[in-house]
Amino acid sequence: MGALLLPLQEVSSQMSRGYVILWHGTSKSRADIITRTGFYAHSFFARLPGISWTYASAKQKQDDPGVLVLCAVDLKSYKKSEYQKKRNGLIYHFKPPVPKNAVAGIFRIDEYTRAELNKEADWLRIKINRYHLKRFEIRRKQPQVVITRNCSEEAIAYWINSYLSTRTNRRIKAAHPGVTQIRTWVEKNYNNGRISPISDWEMLTQLRRNVPGLFRNARSA
């Protein structure tokens, strides 16, 4: 899997709850300009990476690969007359320019599969929801366990279910293979000399890698 051309940016905690996760297909050279100046007026976006994939393929040249730009667009910052939804809401057409701060990531289509791109969109959605929870002071149930060397699969499963309780309708069991993989990763860290507890962000990263299906049912805050 290829590396990100642009690291995921921190989404502003001031973003309204009217965001939508969208994809824009273009070339790498144009994507570089977008990160500096934003999108053209009358730009098209899609909710599914497969739709924008066609545009990216058409834009690419021999020395200029096609890319997909992952965006988080705040619909509440636009009047309803300033954007249109087509094909049952799968295509968005924005009449004003979409600003550069909507960009969350850029992915070359020859380095990522569509399934991997869907996971990136799921992760961005979880990330934005975390900021909404903080902004509106919605207190989630905090895990009452700190992940350290001595944590079992049961403790890790408890941490996962507690931490994601406000954003998913699924729960995970200690016997899940992904939990075992996370437990192995934790043990390896401490065998290599680690002494500090595992951070929330590290745990979420491991969840994304080992239990990606858990994020597909994430609800908006």
Image: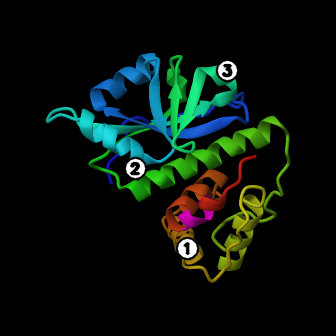
Give the side of residue 30 with respect to residue 158, left or right. left
Alpha carbon of mark 1 to alpha carbon of mark 2: how far?
27 Å
Looking at the rendered structure, the secondary structure element under dot 3 is loop
Of callouts 3 and 2, which one flags the residue occurring earlier in the amino acid sequence? 2
Magenta stretch, main secondary structure, is: helix
Q: What residue do we see at 73% from left, 36% from top?
A: 17
Q: Can residue 195 be seen in this view?
A: no
Alpha carbon of mark 3 to alpha carbon of mark 2: how far?
27 Å
Of callouts 1 and 2, which one flags the residue occurring earlier in the amino acid sequence? 2
Residue 139 vs 82, above or below: the answer is below
Out of 117 and 51, give the one closest to the viewer. Answer: 51
Q: What residue do we see at 54% from left, 79% from top?
A: 177
Q: What residue do we see at 82% from left, 53% from top?
A: 140
Q: Mark 1 points at which residue?
A: 178
The residues colored magenta run: 211-215
Residue 31 position within the rendered picture, expressed as x and y whole percent measured from the top left: 36, 28
Residue 47 vs 35, above or below: the answer is below
Q: Mark 3 points at which residue?
A: 79
Looking at the rendered structure, the secondary structure element under dot 2 is helix
Q: Nearer the viewer, mark 1 or mark 2?
A: 2
Disc number placed over residue 50 in the picture, else none: 2
Extreme-bottom residue of the structure: 175
Q: In which quarter of the image is the N terminus?
A: bottom left
Residue 127 position within the rendered picture, expressed as x and y whole percent measured from the top left: 63, 45
Alpha carbon of mark 1 to alpha carbon of mark 3: how far?
43 Å
Q: Report which quarter residue 40 is drawn in.
A: top left
